[in-house]
Image (cartoon, grey):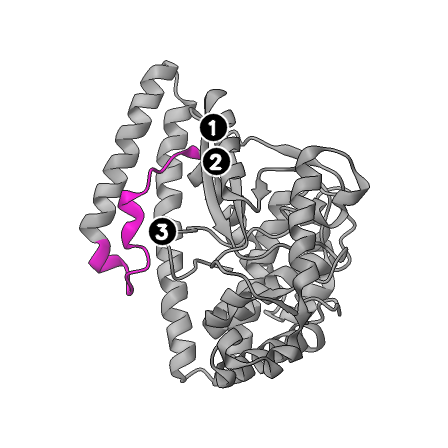
Amino acid sequence: MKFPPVFLYTGIPTLAAALVLLGVSTLFSGCYTLKQGASMLGYLNRAIPLKALLDLPPEKTGDPEENRVFVERVRDIRRFAQEELGLRHTANYTRYVAIDQDYLAAVVSASAQDSFSRHEWWFPVVGKVPYKGFFNPDDARREREKLQKKGLDVWIRGVDAFSTLGWFKDPLYSYMRRYPVNRLADLLIHETLHATVFLKGQVQFNEELAEFVGSEGSRLYMERTFGLDSAEYRAMIDSEADSAVFIAFIQELIAELEVLYRSNARRDEKLQKKEEIIKAAQARFDEKYETLFRSENYRGFSKLPVNNAYLELYRLYYAGGSYLEDLYDRSGRDLPHFIAAVKTLTGRGDPRAQLEAALGLASE
C-alpha cells in the first residue's frame, strides 16, 4: 500500500507481518506477546463472515448499498489476486470486524540519532524485525519513552493491517469500507503476497516485494475493472504520481543526511547539522508544494517532527523499488509470471539473485 489519504496520520505504507507473533503468541511466554496476542485474538473472535455484513441492520453497519459494493469488491479483488495473479488461495479477508477507530495498531520504529542504523526486535517465527506493534497506543508511547532514554530517534504510526502468514484468517476491518478501490486492492494484494511468500530474516526484501506487487497488482486490477480512460484509473495515476514525487523528495533528504553521517564531524555537530538540513528541506517542500503535487495529501509534511526513525522507514520500503521494477521490465512485465518466480524463493542465500535466476535473467 502506498500513502493513505490522511497523510499526517500514517505517512508510510502498511506494515505487513509486523505482528505475525500474534498468531502464535499463545505458544510463547512473555508479557508482550501474550498481551498483544490477546488483543488480536479478541478482534478475531469478533469477526463475522463477510457475507453476514449484508444482513445486519443499517443502524449497525451503515448504508446497505455501500456494504453490498464493499463485499462484492473484496470478493472480486481476492479472486483476481488468487486466480489471475497466482497468489496463494487462503481464507483471508472472508471475515469482517467492526472497530471504532480508523487504524488497527500503533507501531514503533527506532533508529540511531546520528546514522540510519535501525533498531531491531527479535520475535519467534520471523526473527529480527525493525518495528514493534501495539494495539493500545499508550503501550506504544511507553515503548517510545524507553527507546528515547537510550538516545534513539523514535517514530510511532498507525497501520491498518497485519498478515499472520496463515496462522489465522486475517479479517477485514470496518474502516476499510471507506477506502478507494485502488487502495483496497493494493492492501489485499500486498498482504496476500506476504501470505504467499515470506522469507525469514529478510524483512527489507519482504516489504519491498510486497510493496511492488501490491502496487502493480492494484494498477492491473484498476485497468481491468475500469479501463485506462476511466476517472477511477486517472485518480489512481494522480495519487501514484504524488506518491512518487514525495518518495523522491524523501530519498534526496536521506542522501543529504547520509553524506553528513559519513563525515568526520563530531557527533554534536552532526546532530545540529541534521536538524538544520531537515528544517531546510521542509521549508523547500512548502515553497515548491504547488508545483510538485496534484493533491493536498502531503501538505502537512513540513509540520512533522521528522527524524531518522521516520526517514529510515522509507529506506526500508523503497530502497529496492527501482531494482524490482527493472527485473519486472526485463522479464516482460507479466505479473503472474513474476509472482510464479517469487514463489520459488527458498529463503536461503540472496533472494535477489534467486529471483533473477528464477526469471531467467541471471546470465544477462
Q: In the drawing, does residue 232 fall left or right of residue 1? A: left
Q: CA distance from mark 3 to mark 2?
A: 18 Å
Quarter of the image containing the C terminus?
Answer: bottom right
Q: Position of residue 6 (x, y in %)?
A: 38, 58
* Span highlighted in magenta in the image: 289-308
Q: In the drawing, does residue 62 fall left or right of residue 362? A: left
Classify 10 Å Cα crowding around label 1: few (below 14), some (14-19), many (20 and above).
Answer: few
Q: Which residue is mark 2?
A: 141
Residue 156 visible here: yes
Q: Position of residue 138 (x, y in %)?
A: 50, 39
Residue 363 visible here: no
Dots 3, 2 in contact, CB < 8 A: no
Q: What is the number of the mark on residue 8?
A: 3
Q: Which residue is mark 1?
A: 145
The residue nearer to you, when weighing 364 against 129, is 129
Residue type, label 2: Arg
Dots 1, 2 in contact, CB < 8 A: yes
Residue type, label 3: Leu
Q: How many numbered markers are drawn?
A: 3
